[in-house]
Image (cartoon, helix red, strand yellow):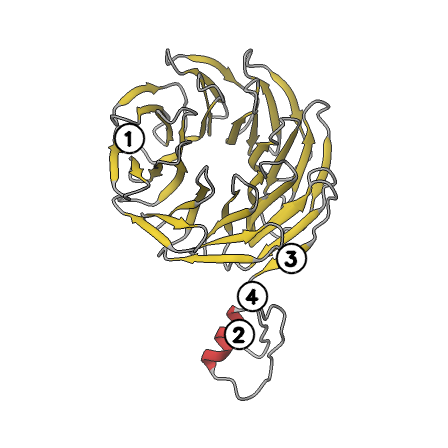
Amino acid sequence: VSGGRDKTIKLWDVATGKCVHTLSGHQGMVNSVGFSPDSQIVVSGSLDKTIKLWDVATGKCVHTLSGHQGEVYSVRFSPDSQTVVSGGRDKTIKLWDVATGKCVHTLSGHQGMVNSVGFSPDSQIVVSGSLDKTIKLWDVATGKCVHTLSGHQGEVYSVRFSPDSQTVVSGSRDKTIKLWDVATGESLDTLSGHQHRVNSVGFSPNGQTLVSGSFDRTIKLWDVTRGNCLHTLFGHNWVYSVRFSPNGQTLVSGSRDNTIKLWDAARGNCLETFCGHQGRVYSVRFSPNGQTLVSGSGDKTIKLWDVARGNCLETFCGHQGRVYSVRFSADGQTVVSGSRDNTIKLWDVATGKCLQTLDNRPYAGLNITGIRGLTDAQIATLKALGAVDHSA
């Protein structure tokens, strides 16, 4: 799955490289996309202030979640697929019921826009990171703020839970990574060493190692228990995205230098450099079996890569803007992409074909130019639902 500047989300078939679905309907670029853990629903968050839920099988928009008063920057499903969390420019976090599309809780308290949100693996706690330099922990059942984690001296760009839900890691503009105790809200450690803002952080699957990617052109691996830097990985320009493989033995990174790099997590050496994109690589992910990589780029394409051989398997073309977010489904059969062109596209891994364009605008493409008897309000409504008026 990929999302980007062209306002669409695309689902891609990993095996064939074909676009399965193009999800159209957002009126602003798509910042964040993701699959539900059961692979049946795609969620997308956009600059148009809405979140949309899409049925993967039919390509239809199931719900449009409205309520944010500003752009939506981050969306995530709960591990049980029942709830979506969203964070945005309006400084709030919202919890949404997937079945009904209703807002369950609005979580207020941040003094700056919310960049990053996520659920704990047990679905009981939500974490949010904000430009107000704080992280907040929220009780999903009650919507109450459990802890405010203060200590960063700069905006918080990335937050993640540990696999056991007991620890949160945060990366900040202040060049540091912090570890926090979920139960007490206390700071456990501050990891220093980066020379620029930290854009991306994450735990290894066993929770023993941290990875961080920075605008200082390095990736660092950290020992969680001791708090020391294990390896500093050189070779990139600005690093936008880093992720561990499912088995924790390797990690992947995407950079401003248009490349993706595969690294040995134990030794810290570069195993492979994947070249082919003509623009910055904003998002990278492993497939669930760890055998394939997907990357989304400023060149408007998504690429699939064979991890073992290091070659490009497919290039998915179709977005009209930068691709900011890509994800595999849990079964590895589908990719979803979100773009600046305001669309989401679904791509079938087995066939590589885009099966349809997913559009919740029933009058998409209808030409109403010159039609008499329509009020300005009716014309505006029809245009919002996809109609075209060339008379203006």
**Residue underneath mark 3:** 357
Asked whether residue 173 appears in the rendered view, the answer is yes
In front: mark 2 or mark 1? 2
**Residue underneath mark 4:** 361
Per the rendering, the mark at residue 382 is: 2
Residue 103 falls left or right of residue 340: left
Residue 354, x across and y down, in percent: 70, 51
Please, what is the three-letter code of the amino acid marked with disc 4? Arg
Residue at 45%, 50% (x, y): give it.
98
Nearer to me, 59 or 72: 59
Task: Of the two numbered discs 2 and 4 on the same chain, state the one appearing first in sequence.
Answer: 4
Name the quarter where the C terminus is drawn: bottom right
Per the rendering, the mark at residue 153 is: 1
Please, what is the three-letter code of the amino acid marked with disc 1? Gln
Question: Circle 3 sits in a helix, a strand or a loop, which is it?
Answer: strand
Name the quarter where the N terminus is drawn: top right
